[in-house]
Amino acid sequence: MRNIIVKVHPSKANLKKKDQLAWKIAEIASDKAKINKDAIEMVINRIIDNASVAIASFNRKPVVSAREMALAHPRKNGATVFGLNSKTKVDCEWAAWANGTAVRELDYHDTFLAADYSHPGDNIPAILAVAQQTKSNGMDLIRGILTGYEVQVNLVKGICLHEHKIDHIAHLGPSIAAGIGSLLKLKTEIIYQSIQQALHTTISTRQSRKGEISSWKAFAPAHAGKLAIEAVDRCMRGEGAPSPIYEGEDSVIAYVLSGPRKKYVVPLPRINEPKKAILETYTKEHSAEYQSQALIDLARSLNRKIKDLSKISKIVIETSHHTHYVIGTGSKDPQKMDPYASRETLDHSIMYIFAVALEDGAWHHVKSYTPQRARKKSTVSLWKKISTRENPKWTKKYHDSNPKNKCFGGKVIIRMKDGSIISQEINVADAHPSGKRPFGREQYINKFITLTKGLITKNESDRFLKTVQNLKNIKPKDLDGLNIEMIHRAKEGFNKKKSIF
């Protein structure tokens, strides 16, 4: 690996392409690096993971809306739509829109946390859609996905968007563009321009994750994927982009991020060095914001220790800066304590999540979020007793540069009404690579079977799992096999509202 120093340069400096971050990313996207065997296996795991959550969210309203928009753009030799027969095809950018929304809706796929946040699995729907439409093969797809992960993970390590209230899809647009560049074996120049266009068009604010959180949270990554595909298409036609997009005098760093005096350090592999960043990422056992994963596991264990939850006086969760300010009471969002809040908001309230997990000793991607569950009297009472506070110890662990030492947990201090105190802490989720029960292929398959039960036939389940595990040998004509068709009676979702498409 090498560390790339990124800072603003005045226009008169005429910064050379080879010294620009977008060019250096494009160079690794267009290189001929060998592919790591473990990385191939993790790509397969993540395709299984994405399929699990996409099928489970098929009938949810944002997914229905995105799918119906996509179906208004049919294309004979396009890309498939999750849940539908593979003969149904749409333009690849619209398939990326529909499938990206389905993957993101339940907040239940993989994550990487460092200087900023990310869900690297969001790269897959767009890259897969382009692969299907361009008749690419399995190894091409693997190469594209590995580049997407590599770029996003390393941008997340080096550049914090959150402190400037910019949504994390600003790292996703460039990573998808780079991944598509690898997939299609494009020239460095085309990928370079595509990365810059994709970044320029995918900058949006974090208001999408503040206060009353709406369904746009599910659409946002799909939006980045759609725009990235369009950016690559334009650049393949010879069009250019705002440049240098990171280092320019009026660039993203200069006016959106930390300004002309800031120096960012972005790690990147050397040219032709294998891309293994995907191995640093981790998936979710529970359908909730990643920083709640470990605390859900802790709540489950505490459920067995505390016989009468009504005897609790208050609960304080000591945790990292990010957890406290994004999903904790440090956010100062009253909606995070509101029993009538949206599912998207409850998903970003560690106070709600911890209360439910502590009461139930479990977590469910549907049952834990129903209005009836959120308004249960005992839950609301317990919920109101929970607060968070930042502890520098946990913030330091959160930002540890060694992936093996990173921690996303916290310490829970429960004060009982009789004055006694119960205290317990957890570093990482049980399913984390460093956790008690790390996810391997068996766990990914079990998650898939659990989430798709009753929605697809056993034959379809077996067919998909056999196909995806043979990914590196898949021929172009067989890439549609990564789609899954649901049983007809499970396809309930529709939207009767009048629209443009």
Image: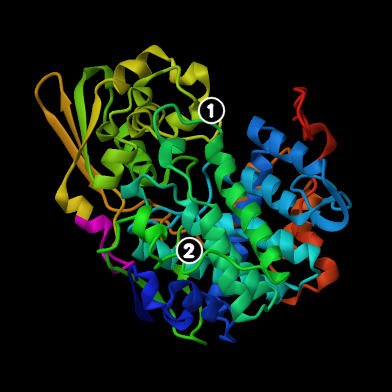
User: Looking at the image, is mark 2 or mark 1 earlier in the sequence?
Assistant: 2
Q: Residue at x 55, y 66 (%)?
A: 195
Q: Give residue 152's mark.
A: 2
User: Vertical placement of 136 versus 75: above or below?
Assistant: below
Is there a contact, CB below 8 Å, between mark 2 and mark 1? no
In the drawing, does residue 26 fall left or right of residue 162?
right
- Colouring of the image: rainbow
Q: Residue at x 41, y 18 (%)?
A: 339
Label 1 Cα neighbours within 10 Å, binned few <14 / some 14-19 / many ≥20: few
Label 2 Cα neighbours within 10 Å, binned few <14 / some 14-19 / many ≥20: many
Q: Nearer the viewer, residue 133 or 360?
A: 133
Magenta stretch? 396-405
**Foreground disc of the pair 2, 1:** 2
Q: Nearer the viewer, residue 444 or 1?
A: 1
Q: Give residue 367's mark.
A: 1
Residue 160 visible in the displayed image: no
Question: Is-magenta flag for residue 302?
Answer: no
Q: Quadrant of residue 136?
A: bottom right
- Quadrant location of the N terminus? bottom left
